Image (spheres, rainbow, N blue to C red):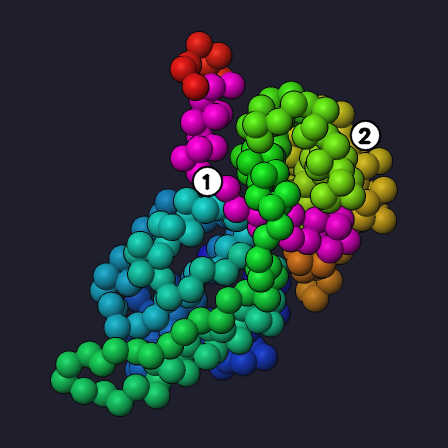
């Protein structure tokens, strides 16, 4: 389901653990394979469209006993929720890590080892918590987490310190001081780095225009975007995109986050109801608090 097979993650990573066969008739994989327990179907997309997702859902409805794995370039919480509600057994975002593939391997192995019975047995399988999830959070991280969530949802537009400070129930001065003290960089510096991180994910899609990426992630000037990108990543956006689309050359998103010193920042939690209520207050100053 990708634009070009040379960009397929299933060929680059999955063959380390699995025997991989490509379907020539994606509408009817059961006509090509004996879909026994332990064998799964993988639908890999760049940016999925509705026909592709409908095909995946119809395949699951037709073959409910077959595990389906979804791989995509499109990082979307809504898409992940949709996929799990339609009973995919795992949802992976490119570029895939070895830990991602190992998790799939362990789950499919557990499915394969279940003794076939007339009634379906309970699968005793517990997925490991990702290693990047912190053991705990400091109080300052929790107080500032609405700011990080605001950047996540609004990085494509203008972000003012005053609005974000209000979300955190702080004065603008207190917010700026605490953010710098906690994360060792200013809030606007964090916004720049987060935009560069998002640009890296978009540049991994083949044939994307650098200027379009710049505007997409919140930069009004592509030349300024190119200078900022080079400052943090060490190469131009064009050079990065060309390398990312060569087999085995794409940097893992975890490595990019580490390079940008964003590791752990984007994982801060926030009370979503409280966050949405405060966003409404900013958008409508007349709303009662």
Q: Percent position (x, y) of residue 109?
A: 41, 83
Spatial CA span between label 2 and label 1: 37 Å
Read off the residue under disc 1: 271
Disc sitting over residue 223 in the figure: 2
Give the magenta range.
257-282
Q: Is residue 101 above or below residue 59?
A: below
| Tally of marks | 2
Instruction: Identify the secondary structure beneath mark 2.
Output: helix
Q: Percent position (x, y) of residue 125?
A: 37, 77
**2 vs 1, front mark:** 1
Q: Is residue 262 above or below residue 178?
A: below
Q: Nearer the viewer, residue 27 or 133?
A: 133
Disc sitting over residue 100 in the figure: none
Magenta-colored stretch includes residue 96: no
Residue drawn at the location 61% of the way across and 38% of the way down? 144
Q: Percent position (x, y) of residue 58?
A: 27, 57
Instruction: Identify the secondary structure beneath mark 1.
Output: loop
Residue drawn at the location 59% of the way across and 53% of the way down? 137
Examine the residues drawn in magenta and state their main secondary structure. helix
Q: Is residue 36 above or below residue 186?
A: below
Q: Quadrant of residue 63?
A: bottom left
């Amino acid at each position: 389901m990708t634009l070009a097979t040379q960009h397929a993650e299933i060929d680059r990573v999955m063959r380390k653990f699995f025997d991989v066969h490509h379907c020539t008739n994606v509408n009817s994989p059961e006509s090509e394979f004996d879909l026994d327990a332990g064998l799964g179907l993988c639908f890999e997309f760049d940016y999925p469209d509705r026909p592709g997702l409908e095909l995946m859902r119809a395949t699951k409805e037709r073959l409910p006993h077959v595990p389906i794995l979804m791989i995509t370039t499109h990082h979307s919480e809504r898409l992940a929720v949709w996929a799990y509600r339609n009973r995919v057994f795992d949802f992976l975002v490119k570029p895939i890590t070895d830990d991602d593939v190992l998790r799939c391997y362990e789950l499919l192995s557990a499915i394969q080892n279940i003794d076939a019975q007339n009634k379906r047995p309970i699968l005793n399988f517990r997925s490991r918590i990702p290693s990047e999830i912190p053991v705990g959070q400091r109080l300052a991280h929790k107080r500032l987490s609405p700011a990080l969530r605001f950047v996540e949802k609004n990085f494509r537009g203008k972000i003012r310190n005053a609005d974000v400070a209000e979300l955190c129930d702080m004065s603008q001065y207190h917010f700026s001081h605490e953010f710098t003290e906690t994360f060792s960089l200013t809030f606007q510096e964090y916004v720049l780095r987060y935009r560069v991180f998002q640009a890296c994910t978009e540049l991994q899609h083949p044939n994307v225009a650098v200027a379009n990426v710049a505007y997409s992630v919140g930069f009004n000037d592509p030349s300024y975007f190119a200078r900022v990108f080079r400052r943090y990543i060490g190469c131009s956006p064009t050079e990065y995109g060309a390398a990312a689309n060569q087999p085995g050359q794409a940097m893992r998103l975890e490595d990019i986050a580490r390079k940008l010193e964003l590791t752990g920042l984007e994982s801060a939690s926030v009370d979503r109801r409280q966050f949405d209520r405060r966003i409404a207050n900013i958008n409508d100053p007349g709303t009662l608090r």
